[in-house]
Amino acid sequence: MYIGILGAWVAVFLTLSILSYLYKDNVFYKLSEHIFVGVSAAHWATIAFWNQVQPNLFGRLWPQAEVAALEGFNKFWYGIYHVLHVLFEKVFPEETINGVLYRGIGDQPQNLSYLIAFILGVFMLFRLIPKIGWLSRWSLAYVIGMAAGLRLYGYMSSDVIGQIHATMLPLWTGNLGESINNIILIVGVLTGLFYFFFSVEHKGALKIVSRIGIYFLMVYFGASFGFAVMGRISLLIGRFNDLIEYSGKQYGFATPILLLIMVAVLILSGRKEKKNKEAEA
Amino acid sequence: MTIKRIGWLLAIISVSSGLAFAELSINAEVVHTEADGNKVIITLTPVPNASSYLIQKSLESGEWVSVIETRDLEFNTNIENDISTRFKVTALDVNRNVLAEAVSEAITTEAKWFNIKRLNRFIALILISGIILYYITRARLNKKIYLRPVAGLQAFEEAVGRATEMGRSVLFVPGIMDLDQVETISGLIILGHVAKMTARYEADLNVPVSRSLVMESGRETVQASYISEGRPDLYSQDMVHYYTDDQFAFAAAVDGVMLREKPAAVFLQGKFYAESLIMAETGNSIGAIQIAGTGSPSQIPFFVTACDYTLIGEEFFAASAYLGSDPKLLGSIKGQDIVKAILMVCIGIGILFETFNVHFFKNLFLGS
Amino acid sequence: MGKFTNFLEKLDSLDRRVIFLIIGLVVLIPLLIPLGLPIETTNLTEDAFYAIEDLPANAKVLLSFEYGPSSKPEIHPMAVSVLRHLFSKGNEVVIMCLWPDGLFMANEALELVAHDEFKLEYGVDYVNLGYRPGNEAVIKGITKSFEANFSVDSRGIPISQIPIMQDVQTARDVDFIFSFSAGYPGAIEWVLYAGDPLQVPVSSGNSSIQVNQLLPYVKSGQMKGVIAGMPGAAEYETLLIQKVEGKEGLLVNKAHALLPNFKENRDATKFMDAQSIAHLVIVLFIILGNISYFVKRKKQQKY
């Protein structure tokens, strides 16, 4: 109950602080900006470690296994895990269930090929040691190469060939409206594509084609801008709705009280600033 | 490096039956009609009075595991490639009495090396890559390549010069995404050129980033530029600094920097999302000269309205070739132009055929 | 006339804080005093609605949550409506998240629709597989195997023990994919890495800003309609209520009983008055701004 009310007060304070930026840069905005940056940086670091590194890397290298049943290479392998457990107990947990000792994380199948990812990750940390810092470039090269490979087919198949297929439309379909739509679409695609020709000088007739292309692009940008305004207003409505909800008695009139306090502080600090300026002058 | 998992199978399990103890016959047929799959389509013939059919499949151990209990006479399931699998169908009545039972023959699916349905994509890939590589080679052999002027590129030097004159800093944001986005890489290449200018003019450079990998690459890029301009003394690691991965928190931080440091030149070059307008609007409000560039179509309108110059879509990718004179980049731009011309011709031919109701050409571009 | 010209000229140098204040007021007032403006449905939303409507009763639908609190006002009402629609038809739902915050959004929507309203059984009628990092690599991964990517669901239950997942081994086994998306990874990645390669129909509910980018995919048939921002969500709410009221198509018994609930709790429709009036005022600003620009330019040309 009290936690809910406290949460509402914090939410209202931070929302109003950020909105106060519309008036001018001020202490409330600065405070909320720093809180936002700090909290989000910590939030992302935590998520990256506990959702990615721990379960998906360590969990694949050392999935949970019964210690007594380990044999051969895995006995040695889970021995390393045990050392890590001693050093970092929370990250590399061991647990006893019904008197049986288990080592490892989660129940994903063991996949030692993740060692490559592990090594590349360690290479990134070598940045801290200038002499071998160059090894981190291998990791960066992997990220870039992997992304290019992963995306190449998808983009080419769906965005290039798929869209070319969709643009091959008849100029006359038997229906006037549909035919006009097709012609507009075709002219838009071809002139738009031509605008992005860099190795040909756009002069004479080609300049007209390129100009038509940029007009089509401008129409697209205009429409996008309209959609963006729509989205921003929706988000504003969402925040206002929360502010209205939190202005009720059950939340201790959080919105009106905080709003009044902030307006008063801003007016006072504005006056002080003015006085200081006058004194300086 | 992905080996296409190929292999597709159609198993038809016909449960032909009549009364409770009717004789059953089962056909299992393997038909490779589609790649990238180990899919099995099971078709049942109805058993009178059956209320549901329990389908089980055999494991390697010989154990039967339930797949589904269904009333449908056709459904899909998958099996593991290269493992001999059998299906058992049990027809049950409302009281769960067994009416009939049948087991299919063992069937095995296998991955194939080549997906014939994607042949057109393969040819296109070879063609596009081939053309681009050819023009890169030509550019390397010192064949001159003409590039038309692009508005905005000349303004880079002017913006840095203005910042120097005013004694204010240059702010460069290489987008909010990681190195796996081509826009980020393009942004970093442009950062390299801008860093050369700031080194020459001795202007302060400030590069806030939202990804750790981008920070590392950004630092290397800026350092290399300062060294190449003979001013390693002006370089400091803090020029490129990380705030947070969070989109709007990063935008708030950059806004704060803009308001307090009041940079004279702002470069927004990379992959942006909804934060683009927030940054560009703040940059505009402090009177900085702003040059934006992005490949994200939905963000270009905001840059166009709030910035002094905007590199639109491919102009942004081409900018790195314009700013430097790397034959690799120049050649790839020429190659891409040729590819675009070929695609336009294809579209034209396709439109002609479609207008005359001939569909074979359009169908060449079908597939997944 | 001269006064009006002067006013238009002054508009050009109007303090932006005045505009902020006006926009704030036109958003706030309709929220406090609703007008009940009618909602007209558009083709984009209808295409998405009927793509789901046409799915058979035993269809399994994969919903992916790719948004967080920052885009919740736009997208969350869509998620609630689509879940209501699917459960009204008796479809089974598999949920996954490509954004970490998506998990909280999915849980919130499921708590309301699956648990409180339809009182459905977890694991049998729906499942929430949770968040997995990896962006499009996860999409590509589930085209091969769900189990390899989601060994356990969001509650830690191994997916081999979840009844609904018994015959959903890859993304190919679902009949429809719906992405609630506010950016990357989102709807486009679903088309590129699952919809197109597997030929599974894809549709999506998006933040308004992305809609233009998705239209080429809708036009080419690679995507079955789009729910565009809050107005799209309001249209979807309207279509769903029309369906349940008119007892159209597949409908489980519970759905009709929940109709008053659907009507009462429709956030997007509730907010549309504020949205429409704000749009109207912004259009006015744009017109006045342009007139002011041209008047000023004409005057400058005179001298």
Image (spheres, rainbow, N blue to C red):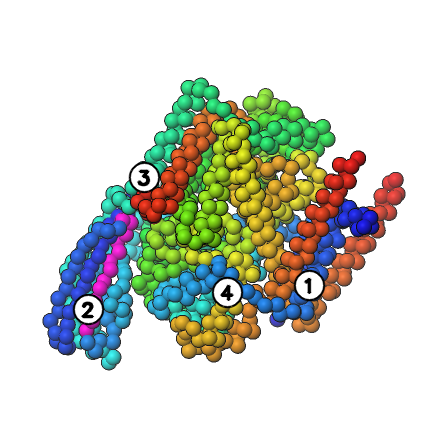
Q: Is residue B149 left or right of residue C92?
A: right
- CA separation, marks 2 and 3? 41 Å
Q: Main secondary structure of the magenta part?
A: loop
- CA separation, marks 1 and 3? 56 Å
Which structural element holds mark 2?
A: loop
Q: Amino acid at mark 2?
A: Thr
Q: Is residue B305 a member of the stretch shown in magenta? A: no
Using a 10 Å C-alpha cutoff, classify the residue at mark 1 as few (fewer than 14 neighbours), some (14 to 19) or many (20 or more): some
Provide residue A198's location: percent of width, then percent of height.
Answer: 50, 30
Q: Which residue is mark 4?
A: C236
Q: Which residue is mark 2?
A: B45
Residue at figure coordinates x 40%, y 47% from the top left? A170
- CA separation, marks 1 and 4? 24 Å
> Which chain contains the residue that carries disc 2?
B
> Which chain contains the residue that carries disc 1?
C
Of callouts 1 and 4, which one flags the residue occurring earlier in the amino acid sequence? Answer: 1
Question: Which span is picked out in magenta?
Answer: B35-47
Q: Amino acid at mark 3?
A: Phe
Q: Which residue is mark 1?
A: C28
Q: Looking at the image, which residue sits at the far bottom?
A: B95
